[in-house]
Image (cartoon, rainbow, N blue to C red):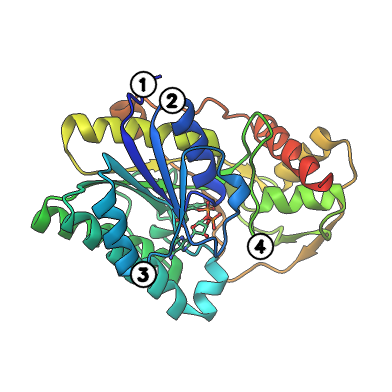
Amino acid sequence: MNGDGKKILVVGGAGYIGSHMVKLLCLQGYDVVTVDSLVNGHREAITGGEFVQGDLEDRDFLARLFASHRFDCVMHFASFIQVGESVTDPAIYYRNNLINTQNLLEAMTASGTMNLIFSSSAAIFGEPEKTPIDEDHPKAPVNPYGRTKLMTEEILADFGHAYGLRSVSLRYFNAAGADPEGELGERHDPETHLIPLVLQAASGRGPEVRVFGRDHATPDGTCVRDYIHVNDLCRAHILAMEKLWRSGESRAYNLGNGSGFSVQEVIETARKVTGRDIRVVDAPRRDGDCAVLVADSSRAGEELSWSPEFPELETIITHAWNFEKRMCSR
Ligand code: NAD
């Protein structure tokens, strides 16, 4: 127990990654308050601490929240996350991911709450010029979702200079897997992420899997992505928070497995793990899909002493499958 009763606000803690974060923080002895509007989250995914339903668009709610609690750190997971939807309806992305985030930052700084861990994304980099992608790689997001994440990082830097806000931006690549105890997992609606889609096809809860292009510049022609276990992401949050408390220095880290897996490898590994047939249909390439997206996470290794505990694709898929079976039996 290293939490020592420190009080952590988890915004978006009823969602996929946030719910795993709440569980880990509680296990480590932190005093956790979860805020979530439940627009995309699930009440039953919050397994510990206090829950307050509220929306970041509500500035009065935020003022009351920060007046009634003193938080040692805020972890901010709350945003909309669908890249395709951000292209067809950018307004809701700029409103929720940027304006509502600014509401949170203003409420924090007004109350003297100065430590933030922010869920950023590999989407800030856009089309990679080189791979693996380190923190200094040029940032040229190709969709509104990625732009909201990059703009938020820029706002954080400005709030740091002007008001003394200290922040760590964690740029996740593809969050994947599930709670090793099978209690929590990925429940997006609609689901757009490959591993849950493949497992829903295996369980019969979802349709066949579409493979977008087999002519990419990769060994088997399908896109290669960097799948990082959700619990490894959560461990990185705690290490980043503890370093922020020690050093007071704002930083950004890329978080990935360091090794990419192709769509075809994911499907084959899922067939092995589940023992099920997984129906696949080939579809044309999607606009903007780059061949390979893999993180260079060496800065997180050097500065946070972080490395993935569950780097194997088979383990990631096994944990996600345990959760999918649980969903089927509900
Ligand atoms: P999620 O949709 O499962 O969780 C987000 C949570 O935030 C939901 O519970 C939702 O109800 C809540 N929320 C949204 N807007 C809110 C608001 N205005 N006020 C209060 N609550 C609100 O998403 P996730 O997959 O857990 O992603 C968490 C964060 O990580 C997001 O910021 C996302 O952009 C980032 N991220 C995720 C991935 C990934 O692979 N899942 C990759 C890179 C970055």
Residue 152 place in picture, x, y as percent: 30, 61
**x then y, percent, for residue 282:** 79, 62
The reply to whether callout 4 and callout 1 are in contact (CB within 8 Å) is no
Q: Check disc 1 and report the residue beneath it.
A: 2
Disc 4 to disc 1, C-alpha distance:
35 Å
Q: Residue at x 28, y 29 (%)?
A: 303
In this view, the mark in front (1 or 3): 3
Task: Write down the quadrant of residue 315 in the picture.
Answer: top right
Q: Secondary structure at mark 3?
A: loop
Q: Earlier in the sequence, mark 1 or mark 2?
A: 1
Q: CA distance from mark 4 to mark 3?
A: 24 Å
Disc 1/disc 2 C-alpha distance (Å)? 6 Å
Three-letter residue code for mark 3: Asp
Element marked by disc 4: loop
- Residue at 49 percent across and 46 percent down: it is 18
User: From the viewer's perspective, is residue 277 above or below residue 104?
Assistant: above
Provide residue 239's location: percent of width, then percent of height: 35, 30
Residue named by callout 2? 28
Disc 2 marks a residue whose amino acid type is: Gln
User: 281 or 305, which is in the foreground?
Assistant: 305
Direction from residue 117 to residue 215 in the image, left or right: right
Tell me if 20 is positioned left or right of 222 in this view. Answer: left
Q: CA distance from mark 1 to mark 3?
A: 33 Å
Q: Nearer the viewer, mark 4 or mark 2?
A: 2
- Please state which amino acid type lies under the numbered disc 4: Asp
Labels 3 & 2 near each other (Cβ < 8 A): no
The one of 190 and 41 positioned closer to us in this rendering: 41
In the rendered image, which residue does mark 4 sit on?
Answer: 189
Q: Considering the image in quadrants, where does the N terminus appear?
A: top left
